[in-house]
Image: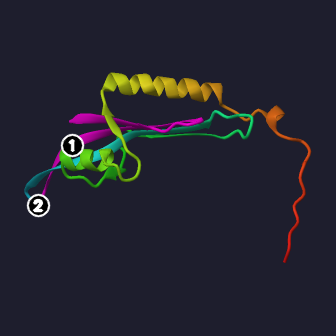
Amino acid sequence: MKVHYFYSRGGNGFHDLQLTAMMEEEIYRKGLKEKRFTYIENLKIFINTNMKRHHDASFKIDFGKDSCSGHWAKSRKELYRDLTDDIGRKYKPITQAQYLRLRKVAFAIYQRETCMNFDLVKKKQDYTVNVIF
């Protein structure tokens, strides 16, 4: 069994990071050997860094040693082609050490932005909304 590590990031005024670890297993189906890829950790973090205009943060992590969530690929080539393709979100393969370092950074960012600062919320509405039916 081998574990594959990937990351994807956005930018321009926000932290947008996704980390994915997938376990590769060999299985036999109808007498034929094929590979199966299972998600063992999927971490997504999004934090807006332009706090003057609006404050937005999201942190989600899914993990499991015996996860049942998998990828459709039947070979490493298919897996890497799907995850690193330009269509949709583009992932880059990384090493385990890089993955663990990025995960540590993601948790540090999350700890810094754990809850909403209610002092930033406007207490008075400074605009009017007209509804026309």
* Mark 1 surroundings within 10 Å by alpha-carbon count, few (fewer than 14), some (14 through 19), many (20 or more): few
Task: Spot the residue most to the front.
Answer: 12
Coloration of the structure image: rainbow
Compare residues 124 and 65 and report the one nearer the observer. Answer: 124
Task: Spot the residue most to the bottom.
Answer: 133
Residue beneath label 1, please?
Answer: 25
Q: Is residue 32 above or below residue 93?
A: below
Residue at 33% from the left image edge and 50% from the top image edge: 70
Residue 72: give x, y in percent of width and height. 28, 55
Q: Report whether 81 appears left or right of 124.
A: left
> Does the residue at mark 1 contact the one at mark 2 (Cβ under 8 Å)?
no
For the stretch drawn in magenta, the main secondary structure is: strand
Magenta run includes residue 24: yes
Residue 91: give x, y in percent of width and height. 36, 41
Residue at 27% from the left image edge and 34% from the top image edge: 3
Would you identify the image quadrant in which residue 130 lies?
bottom right
Question: What number is the disc on residue 30?
Answer: 2
* Mark 2 surroundings within 10 Å by alpha-carbon count, few (fewer than 14), some (14 through 19), many (20 or more): few
Tell me which segment is drawn in magenta: 1-29
Q: Secondary structure at mark 2?
A: loop
Residue at 16% from the left image edge and 49% from the top image edge: 27
Task: Spot the residue most to the left.
Answer: 31
> Considering the image in quadrants, where does the N terminus appear?
top left
Q: Secondary structure at mark 1?
A: strand
Magenta run includes residue 2: yes
For badge 2, the amino acid type reads Lys
> Considering the image in quadrants, where does the C terminus appear?
bottom right
Q: Report whether 98 appears left or right of 78.
A: right
Identify the mark nearer the N-term, 1 or 2: 1
Q: Report whether 96 appears left or right of 118.
A: left
Q: Report whether 127 appears left or right of 89.
A: right
